[in-house]
Amino acid sequence: MTAPKPEQLVQIDYGPPQRSWIEPSASFRPGTYSHAAHAKSLAYLGLPNPREWRPAEEDWKLPPDWKQIILVGMKERLEKYRSFRLFMDICVRCGACADKCHFYLGSGDPKNMPVLRAELLRSVYRRYFTTAGRLMGALAGARDLTEDVLKEWFYYFYQCTECRRCAVFCPFGIDTAEVTMIARELLNLVGCNINWVQEPAANCYRTGNHLGIQPHGFKDSIEFAVDEIEEITGIRVEAPINRKGAEILLVIPSADYFGEPHYFTLLGYLMLLHAAGVDFTFSAYASEGGNFGLFSSHELMQRLNAKIYAEARRLGVKWILGGECGHMWRVIHQYMDTMNGPADFLEQPVSPVTGTRFENARSTKAVHICEFTADLIHHGKLKLDPTRNNRWNVTFHDSCNPARAMGMFEEPRYIIRNVCAQFHEMPANTIREQTFCCGSGAGLGNDENFEMRMRGGLPRATAVRYVKEKFGVNLLACICAIDKATLPPLLEYWVPGVEVAGVHELVGNALVMPGEKERVRDLRGEPLGGEPEHA
Amino acid sequence: MSEARVFFGVVVPYAALLTFLAGLTFRVLSWARSPVPFRIPVTCGQQKSLPWIESSRLENPFTGWAAACRVALEVLAFRSLWRNQQAERAGARLVYEPSRLLWLAAMAFHWSLLTILVRHLRLVLSPVPKAIAGLMSLDAFFQVGMPVVYATDVAIVAALLYLAGRRIVNPRVRYLSLFPDYAALVLLLAVAGSGILLRYFLRTDIASVKQYALSLAAFSPQPPAGAGTLFYTHLSLASLLVAWFPFSKLVHMGGIFLSPTRNLANNSRAQRHVNPWNHPLPVHTYEEWETEFREKIKTAGLPLEKE
């Protein structure tokens, strides 16, 4: 599979086609969809209809009563989620959301307009659950549930990254993420899921993390990081695993200890926690903060997330500190306490260094590491030398979930301003609550979906190019593991010359640890230069 | 009374009102019956976290009151629509220009509609309350024409024409529009148009209309003999609109108050949100995990619960 060149891909036609959207039109062109989930992952998780199948083939091997299953599932969810029922009823098709979706901006496909993405489901809702739809059919925008409609759902609901940007602009707050989550649940009922979601979920269920790393492998990679820090700083930091009685359980996305550039962020956390003298432990059983269950169903999200509280209880920690990860924080912030709480066996988080009580986390007992670090810096507890990051000219990419499902804008920016000399914002329409997705979230960051990822990431990349050309930005900082995995190829494709880093990598570079040897290399092993590379 | 007069003057308005009330109650109850299992506000401003970081209380409310203010801002000023912008590709660049005509038209339409409805209350209230009389003179502020032209009459027609024109002219919006979208606009235009004709051009005897309205309100309907076809057309179109309301997208009026991405405080880490149907699900327990990986855990030198 060869991907089209950037100059070809950017020739996007926003003119809608002749054919009405009512006719199902998914065509499974290589590069624009994800592979189906393997039977073994579904079987391991006890999910319906495990089998080997391919989206591009005619026969999807659906259960004989698939239609009934979907309609019953829809009815059940209409009764369980006010969001779903309301969002099926109140859209006025004003079109304000239309050009807010990165997949629409990158593809020009009208079914990527959030309103039409939802209409794909709404049309079936009207046909089977409203009088007007039953009586008037297509005239009222209703259509029968057919295999082609189901295939279209699969194509387009796995072409939404649940980033919630459209929901910022919708006058009624209709949230396509919510619609997509329900649609994916329905697809799951008949076994239509993608491998990049279900295999990590199955791995996480079994081993404790998405990558399927077993306890000894986890220990090895953490040890490796400790060795690396010793080489760079001369200091051997503590990184205990499954240690009972620690004050804090540290939960991070597994990519942090197996991927690059995530790994440099891990080094940053460990150095920070050592320098601040924090008593913490990792857990090999709950060695994943990310939660691919979120991209599959509420149930799977709950089942994977359960490990964090279970392990906090078993280890007897006081509270939980969470690393840099976007959808992990959607789950911790908006779902964890409701699904698997109450966390009455934990204590309200208090920073052991500054004494700050994290009032905003008094029920969940989970604090974001950016909140923790910003508090440390604010109280002057860290010695920082921003010149060590002088080779970087930084911009900050707000990751969708910390932005639109938390509102964590200032904490990471405050940290960056304290650890870097050069920082420039991207244009206002592309940051904070209006931030653009990397185009690869919600399980879509796989190789086979490459073209669609490059399309979805176009608006983000375009904004990066703007600050690169205007200010000489050469590093994009972010606080999301999926960003760190998928933005490097995206920027390589659209804006070569801009690298990606976690905020705590920059913290690790700038941090002057008590008793450290003279630093000659940064966390990437590059020589520390004195002067900025880009004036 | 002729049969036609009874039908259009008595049956139609009462049936429409009944349908409206029953339909809307059914709709709102059906929404309210479905619980809100998770606290899922869409945050559009800085969260409340550390005391020295200023949080955005309206765009990211931390309390129920602040969330109510956020909803009020949506309902009264269409806050989210105000953000609207148009994305355009300029070569390899994407440009986002503020695009607020839609906001303006939506505000003009909804506020005019409300003013016109309140103005109509003068017909069923005797004496006319001061507030309504005041609103009417405000609406007639420009003192143009005879009878004096209400600003909202002009605004509502202009706004509806813009909204209809936009659906037809903008290819994107045309593509996603459905028959009911046009039908709603046409019906609203017809109601407004017939009302304007009644007031400015083919004037009806307003005293007898008021008498009739009062009789409707007193549940002893006396359809006026003096009112002509145009009056009954206006009344029937308005009745049709009212009756259709609960079964169409027009119910977005009720829905906005219930929207969980807007009406909830973003305090889910500070205050536990309870899901009424939450239940335990199968999980992979620590014990199962330790049993499966016992040897590897031991070799790695990690502590075990059971040796």
Image (spheres, coloured by chain):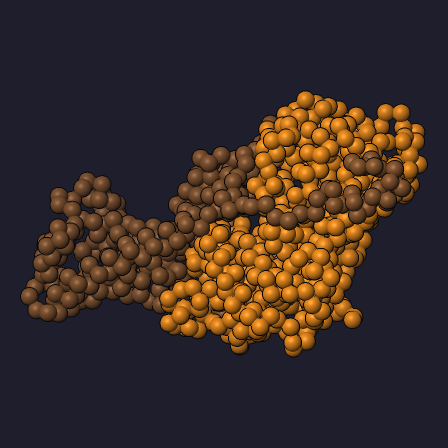
Chain colours: A orange, B brown
**Residue A268 location, x and y as percent?**
80, 37
Q: Which residue occupies the foreground of this view, A512 or A334?
A: A334
Instruction: Identify whether A228 is placed above or below B155.
Output: above
Camera sees residue B210 = no
Residue at 61 percent across and 54 percent down: it is A297
**Residue B18 location, x and y as percent?**
24, 57
User: Furthest residue to the front?
Assistant: B307
Instruction: Identify whether A331 is placed above or below A182.
Output: above
**Residue B212 location, x and y as percent?**
11, 56
Instruction: Identify whether B48 is placed above or below A461.
Output: above
Camera sees residue A33 = yes
Residue at 39 percent across and 53 percent down: it is B30
Question: Based on the displayed image, in which of its 4 quarters is residue A518 positioned?
Answer: top right
**Residue A379 location, x and y as percent?**
70, 24
Q: Which residue occupies the foreground of this view, A298 or B53?
A: A298
Q: Is residue B274 left or right of residue B18?
A: right
Q: Is residue B119 left or right of residue A505?
A: left
Residue at 56 percent across and 38 percent down: it is B268
Q: Where does the N terminus of chain B fall, quadrant-wise?
A: bottom left
Question: Based on the displayed image, in which of its 4 quarters is residue B73 positioned?
Answer: top left
Number of labels in the image equals 0
